Image (spheres, rainbow, N blue to C red):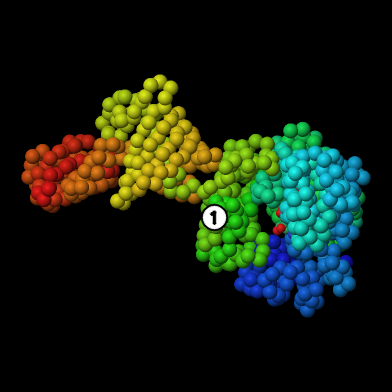
């Protein structure tokens, strides 16, 4: 096998950029390819050379093996790296590489062919005494036969395209009546995507976990595993959050998975990196072989972060004929890594893919954080390819620390111009259930009504609940100096057992929102009325000094909440909001003054100490006369009368400590 000095990357986006990085480390020249849509993209700019291969549709460019081989010959590369997706599991590309003496970076044509069909892969696994999901893996594909098999397996069951990948050609069937319709759809989808409509049937394991084992083999017959990953957090059978190693897994099960994966790789005489996927029944702990992916996996960085192995460099070394640079005993797992996939899609609108220009794009930089991306600010998200734009991967000594780092990293990620699932990913990671046993039902379980990004109204409602909750914890009934602490006085407490009703007001510009809270003990139904628009939220709040946990209609998040008098501040890595609520009397005063002259009151502009009060009730004042002095931030500020008239009320005396916004003096204006 020849040394690799120049390499063609038959892919695009983040994985092309990832491969370029390993090429740079190994001193290998990289040749990128691009379609019309990708002319100015990151992988084109980062490679040593880039060659145009066709129009934007994948079939005309990244899936065109003939054109790619042509470019490989023209640029005199030694090898082709296919990345994942596109031609990574194409036996045709390998055949063409062999004909032209170009090294294909991946396993042998036989390994790919044997594992490419899920039906065949399950037969092989079965022969090696590896448990497979009960179902039907037969050659006979007639509707009658499949229906009879479906009845035998029982419902719910999954119809899967044998040639499938990326969740395509897969349908869940809950009852017999749905079977034939779902079968037709699955077959059609499989034919379109893979040119092969054979299907297999599998019993659907409802509470299942997706756990996979990274394997690697060389041309000398050595095989090792690089431990496990858990990818149970999925949507539409597609992974969204992945981690290494799996949490909450017994040592015995973990070892059994390693043994099965290594046995399969040894049987295949596997040369390269690959992943053996299993499904683990969360209730019984039983596990079943699912499929083998004979390529680099999207989630490979998690394994890299816990093992310290550069999997792309390893692929290249193996393809050059090199032996594995380690034996099994040399390998170990250090800490924990979690990856989240940032997709250009709108989780608030059925996850519809988003296209457009990334007007703002800034990746987070922090210790223990890695970002693998294929875009930069100004990049265009085109409709032609995968919606994944970046992966954020965090490492930590423990799973908890890795999760926290990832949450922080996602929070610090600035992306605008196209909608992404960034906040959705944060909501998934912030859920307390993230620390329990994960299953593929995770998203449905934590967001049974679907997930919606929190808008302004939700934040306002949370702030109101925070204020009410704080008031509740204070001694009720005690009369104290600030109007705000009299909140309990205008809370209408009905008989025992019936929740109290609290009403708050918020002025924003010219409009006032009325917020009614019913409930207590951190659990409220909040009704918001603003300009005759009514909205209602169910809010659960666990108010803490730091990181309060909030749940709004099933969607959970962590916020820092600070309360100062009647002012509530919400802060998280995503937002900073402040709300100044009004008590009933302040609200009525506002309403009244809105009808007369709003400049006839003096309020403290800032919190401070009243050092002097120069006016008394009944005094005549001229606009601009000094009425009070307030000391704030070590400076004494004079506060002047906003209008000429008679002082009708003085609310403070020298020596008072006042909060910002406090009403100090009221003047009956001459013009009234
Ligand atoms: P992984 O297991 O590496 O996370 P996924 O199943 O998420 O893999 O797929 C990775 C990428 O490759 C996705 O873009 C997916 O659409 C694509 N992909 C996977 N398998 C196939 C296939 N057989 N044919 C076409 N695209 C595929
Ligand atoms: P693909 O080639 O699209 O990756 P897989 O067979 O790996 O197809 O299945 C994709 C995902 O669907 C798995 O990760 C798993 O979560 C889910 N799944 C697959 N088979 C079953 C099953 N029999 N029961 C429950 N979930 C399943
Ligand atoms: Mg799979």
Point 53% across, 53% down: residue: 412
Point 66% across, 61% down: residue: 386
Residue 571: quadrant of the picture: top left
Residue 590: quadrant of the picture: top left
Point 87% across, 42% down: residue: 130
Query: Can see residue 389?
Result: yes
Query: Can see residue 320?
Result: no
Q: Position of residue 39 (x, y in %)?
A: 63, 73
Q: Position of residue 286 (x, y in %)?
A: 80, 36
Give above or below for 442 relative to 475.
below
Quarter of the figure that contains the N terminus: bottom right
Q: Position of residue 378 (x, y in %)?
A: 55, 67
Give above or below for 384 relative to 537.
below
The residue identified by callout 1 is: 413
Left or right of 168 on screen, residue 497: left
Point 82% across, 67% down: residue: 93
Q: Position of residue 653 (x, y in %)?
A: 17, 36
Give the camera-side residue of 178 and 222. Answer: 178
Give the camera-side residue of 145 and 28. Answer: 145
For label 1, the SS is: loop
Give above or below for 438 relative to 115.
above
Q: Residues within 10 Å of mark 1 (few under 14, many from 20)?
A: some
- The picture quadrant for ligand 1 comes to bottom right
Residue sitting at the far top: 496
State yes or no: Cβ of the residue under disc 1 lies below 8 Å from any atom of ligand 1.
Answer: no
């Amino acid at each position: 096998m020849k040394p690799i000095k120049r390499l063609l990357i038959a892919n695009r986006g983040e994985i092309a950029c990832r491969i370029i990085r390993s090429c740079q480390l190994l001193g290998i020249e990289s040749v990128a390819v691009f379609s019309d849509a990708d002319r100015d993209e990151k992988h084109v700019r980062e490679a040593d050379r880039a060659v145009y291969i066709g129009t934007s549709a994948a079939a005309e460019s990244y899936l065109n093996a003939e054109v790619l081989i042509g470019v490989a010959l023209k640029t005199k590369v030694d090898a082709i790296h296919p990345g994942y997706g596109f031609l990574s599991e194409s036996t045709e590309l390998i055949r063409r590489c062999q004909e032209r003496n170009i090294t294909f970076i991946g396993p042998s044509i036989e390994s790919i062919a044997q594992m490419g069909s899920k039906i065949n892969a399950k037969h092989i696994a079965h022969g090696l005494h590896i448990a497979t999901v009960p179902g039907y893996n037969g050659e006979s594909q007639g509707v009658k036969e499949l229906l009879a098999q479906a009845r035998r397996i029982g419902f719910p069951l999954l119809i899967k395209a044998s040639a499938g990948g990326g969740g395509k050609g897969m349908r869940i069937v809950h009852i017999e009546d749905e079977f034939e319709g779902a079968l037709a759809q699955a077959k059609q989808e499989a034919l379109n995507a893979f040119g092969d409509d054979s299907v297999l049937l599998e019993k659907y394991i409802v509470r299942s976990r997706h756990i996979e084992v990274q394997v690697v083999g060389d041309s000398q017959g050595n095989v090792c595993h690089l431990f496990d990953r858990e990818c149970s957090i999925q949507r539409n059978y597609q992974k969204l959050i992945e981690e290494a190693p799996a949490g909450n897994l017994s040592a015995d099960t973990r070892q059994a998975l390693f043994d099965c994966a290594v046995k399969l790789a040894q049987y295949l005489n596997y040369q390269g990196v690959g992943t053996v996927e299993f499904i683990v029944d969360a209730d019984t702990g039983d596990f079943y072989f699912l499929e083998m992916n004979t390529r680099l996996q999207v989630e490979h960085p998690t394994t890299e972060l816990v093992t310290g192995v550069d999997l792309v460099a390893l692929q290249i070394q193996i393809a050059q004929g090199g032996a594995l640079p380690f034996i099994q005993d040399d390998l170990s797992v250090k800490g924990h890594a979690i990856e989240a996939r940032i997709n250009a899609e709108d989780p608030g609108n059925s996850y519809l893919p988003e296209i457009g220009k990334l007007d703002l794009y800034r990746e987070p930089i922090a210790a223990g954080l890695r970002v693998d991306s294929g875009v930069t600010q100004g990049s265009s998200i085109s409709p032609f390819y995968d919606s994944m734009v970046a992966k954020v991967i965090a490492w930590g000594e423990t799973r908890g620390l890795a999760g926290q780092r990832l949450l922080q990293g996602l929070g610090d990620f600035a992306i605008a111009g196209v909608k992404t699932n960034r906040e959705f990913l944060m909501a998934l990671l912030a859920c307390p259930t993230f620390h329990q046993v994960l299953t593929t039902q995770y998203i449905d379980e934590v967001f049974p009504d679907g997930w919606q990004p929190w808008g302004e109204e939700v934040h306002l409602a949370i702030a109101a609940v925070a204020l009410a909750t704080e008031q509740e914890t204070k001694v009720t009934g005690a009369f104290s100096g600030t109007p705000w602490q009299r909140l309990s006085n205008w809370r209408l407490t009905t008989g025992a057992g019936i929740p109290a009703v609290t009403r708050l007001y918020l002025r924003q510009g010219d409009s006032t929102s009325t917020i009614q809270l019913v409930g207590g003990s951190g659990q409220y139904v909040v009704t918001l009325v603003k300009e005759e628009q009514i909205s209602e939220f169910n809010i659960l709040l666990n108010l803490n000094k730091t990181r309060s946990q909030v749940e709004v209609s099933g969607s959970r998040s962590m916020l820092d909440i600070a309360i100062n008098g009647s002012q509530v501040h919400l802060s998280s890595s995503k937002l900073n909001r402040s709300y100044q609520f009004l008590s009933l009397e302040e609200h009525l005063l506002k309403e009244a003054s809105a009808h007369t002259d709003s400049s006839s009151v003096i309020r403290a502009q800032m919190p401070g100490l009243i050092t002097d009060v120069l006016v008394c009730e009944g005094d005549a004042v001229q606009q601009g006369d000094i009425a009070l002095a307030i000391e704030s931030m070590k400076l004494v500020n004079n506060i002047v009368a906003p209008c000429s008239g008679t002082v009708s009320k003085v609310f403070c005396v020298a020596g008072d400590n006042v909060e910002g916004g406090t009403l100090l003096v009221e003047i009956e204006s001459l013009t009234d």
